[in-house]
Amino acid sequence: MTRGPIRKVLIAKPGLDGHDRGAKVVAQALRDAGLEIVYTGLRRTAEEIVQEAIQEDVDVVGLSVLSGTHLPMARRVIEGLRAAGADDIDVVVGGTVPPRDVPELQKIGVARVFPMGTPLSEIVASFRNPTASPDVAGRHP
C-alpha cells in the first residue's frame, strides 16, 4: 500500500466461505483505529466486491479468504478494478494463505498479505503507515 493516507476500507468475504469472525474482528480493530469500514457480508462475487468498492469510494479492499480461493478471487477483483478504471484502490488479502502463494499474490498486484495469525496490531499499523515496505512474506518487518 503505497498511496496516501487510508480513510475508508471495504472488508469482503468472497466466494462460498461462510466464516466471517476473523473479518469482523479485523474490521472492528480498523474501525477502532479511526478508519471508516464497510463490510460486505458473506458469499460475495468478485463483481459485487468491485462494484461496492467503487460505489463506496474506498481506498482499500480487504479480501478475507479461508477457503483456499485467495489467488483466483484476488485476481478477479484486481482485474475488475482495473477494467473499471479504479486501479487506485489497493487490494489486501488475509486469511488462510500459504507462504508459497504470497509471491504470486504480490505479482498479480495484492498490496499486502496478512496470513492467519497476523497480530491485529500489525494489521492496524500497516493501514496507519501504508508506505512502509512489507517483508518477503507480505508482512511488516
Image (cartoon, rainbow, N blue to C red):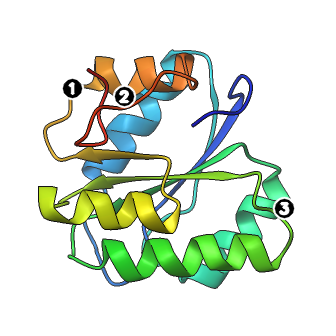
Image x and y of residue 90, in percent: 62, 50
Neighbour class for label 2 at 10 Å: few (<14), some, many (≥20)? Answer: some
Query: Along the polypeptide, which appears first: circle 3 or circle 1?
Result: 3
Query: Along the polypeptide, which appears first: circle 2 or circle 3?
Result: 3
Residue drawn at the location 33% of the way across and 67% of the way down: 104
Label 2 to label 3: alpha-carbon separation: 25 Å
Give the SS element for disc 3.
helix
Residue drawn at the location 40% of the way across and 83% of the way down: 72
Q: Quadrant of the C terminus?
A: top left
Q: Amino acid at mark 3?
A: Gln
Residue drawn at the location 22% of the way across and 65% of the way down: 101
Pointers 2 and 1 in contact (C-beta within 8 Å):
yes
Label 3 to label 1: alpha-carbon separation: 30 Å
Give the SS element for disc 2.
helix
Q: Quadrant of the N terminus?
A: top right
Figure disc tally? 3
Q: Amino acid at mark 2?
A: Ile
Q: Is residue 79 above or below residue 93?
A: below
Q: Is residue 68 above or below residue 139?
A: below
Give the SS element for disc 1.
loop
Image x and y of residue 92, in percent: 47, 50
- Residue identifier under label 1: 119
Residue 132 tag number = none
- Residue identifier under label 2: 123
Pointers 2 and 3 in contact (C-beta within 8 Å):
no
Residue 55 tag number = 3
